[in-house]
Image (spheres, grey):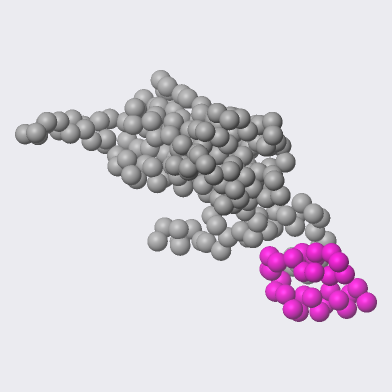
Amino acid sequence: MWKVWIRKLLLLYPRKTASPIPFQGNSIYATGHLLKQMNRNEIREFFFQEGVIHFDETLCDSYNLQKDLTKEMWQSFIKKAKIPENIEPMQVLENLHLEKDERLTYAGAWMLAKDITKYSISAKVLCALFMGTTRTNIPDRQEYTGDLYSIYQNIINYLQAKLNTEFIITATGRIERLELSVDALREAVVNALAHRDYRSTACIQVYIFRDRVEIISPGGLPAGMSKEEQVH
């Protein structure tokens, strides 16, 4: 009976299928002519890779709303987000989809963290300035933790402080212009923070060289996207 089912399943699913196959209450993975039963972690990893489960939407069990969320942290958060003070915190978190069953998601924990590495150990960001075009002479190096917004702002401040600034004298005064577009840098940093793989043990790295800026974000391409599609 088992061999018959294997044949039928292999006929229904291509040899190189990446989809788990439900069978008698279990999930089976087809690879070549073999079928392998998937364990819980493998099933979870598959859905993460396919974008069905998003890490930032999963519950952060290590964040305790009663103990970890202080009044100062909440006031700082609503001020940055421009949220009226008269709205109840739980209502705000629910409206922003940062809370489920009175527990914070990882996204909520990152936004309301005193130190983000308490909940995602690799969520710190490393910024470094190099003298030349290679990773050898490092006159300055900084690591940033805190909450996610503070990390973002610290990265932008670091880039603006370390990149060259052009001073243009005009009839009405002086214009300061960074050698790279601030808007482009902001977009690149936001993308790195938002789309990195927070399950990875690697951290985001922002490197300033004499001829370029590198922003390295752990993780691969979204499910279904090829390198060619990314370029275009």
Looking at this view, name the residue that lies furthest to the right: 1
Residue at figure coordinates x 59%, y 48% from the top left:
91
Q: Quadrant of residue 121?
A: top right
Asked if the magenta segment contains residue 110, the reply would be no
Q: Nearer the viewer, residue 202 or 228?
A: 202
Check the image and report above or below for 224 versus 133: below
Q: Nearer the viewer, residue 184 or 226?
A: 184
Question: Is residue 204 visible from the viewing direction of this image?
Answer: no
Specify start and end residues of the magenta stretch as a single range: 1-29
**Which quarter of the rendering shows the N terminus?**
bottom right
Looking at this view, name the residue that lies furthest to the left: 171
Q: Quadrant of residue 202?
A: top right
Residue at figure coordinates x 86%, y 76% from the top left:
5
Q: Position of residue 174 (x, y in %)?
A: 15, 31
Q: Position of residue 216 (x, y in %)?
A: 48, 41
Q: Position of residue 156 (x, y in %)?
A: 39, 34
